[in-house]
Image (cartoon, rainbow, N blue to C red):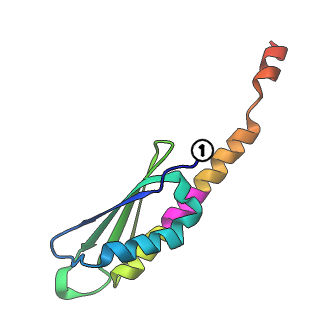
């Protein structure tokens, strides 16, 4: 059974111009997270300009991913522009999901089949 596609929600503060960002965000999410999109049910993307018009490394992207197994992963990245902050956060999320997948796959391999448990008792 195939998992439903991940839903993406964009959350921004008033000082962030979000026009056109959602469409670009969806393209980036499918490009960068495509390998693990079957594990992600919902993706909430928060964007904030922490310093206002002063400039600097103050554009923050926070991703909150709710996985199909019920877990929630939160990652953040900052940069001088939103595009780089979004890409940085998505790369961090991809890394965390892949690490989690590898960890759970190892646990499945180590599990003892029920037939062996019953035979040893």
**Residue at 52 percent of width and 66 percent of height:** 33
Q: Main secondary structure of the magenta part?
A: helix
Q: Please state, as top left, top right, bottom left or bottom right, where the C terminus lies in the image.
A: top right
Q: Is residue 94 magenta?
A: yes
Residue 88 seen: no
Against 104, residue 89 (above or below) is: below
Can you tell which quarter of the image residue 107 is in?
top right
Which residue is tagged 1?
A: 1
Residue range in magenta is 91-98
Residue furthest toward the top? Answer: 121
**Residue at 21 percent of width and 76 percent of height:** 16
Describe residue 68's horizontal placement relative to residue 74 as left or right. right
Describe residue 29's horizontal placement relative to residue 12 as left or right. right
Q: Position of residue 21 (x, y in %)?
A: 31, 76
Q: Position of residue 67 (x, y in %)?
A: 47, 49
Against 109, residue 89 (above or below) is: below
Describe residue 63's horizontal placement relative to residue 10 as left or right. right
């Amino acid at each position: 059974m195939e998992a439903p596609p991940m839903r993406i929600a964009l959350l921004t503060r008033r000082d962030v111009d979000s026009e056109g960002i959602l469409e670009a965000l969806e393209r980036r999410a499918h490009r960068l997270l495509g390998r693990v999109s079957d594990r992600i049910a919902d993706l909430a993307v928060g964007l904030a300009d922490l310093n206002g018009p002063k400039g600097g490394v103050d554009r923050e992207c926070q991703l909150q991913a709710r996985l199909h197994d019920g877990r929630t992963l939160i990652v953040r990245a900052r940069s001088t522009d939103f595009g780089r902050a979004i890409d940085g956060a998505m790369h961090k999320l991809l890394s965390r999901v892949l690490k989690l997948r590898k960890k759970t796959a190892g646990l499945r391999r180590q599990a003892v089949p029920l037939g062996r448990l019953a035979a040893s008792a």
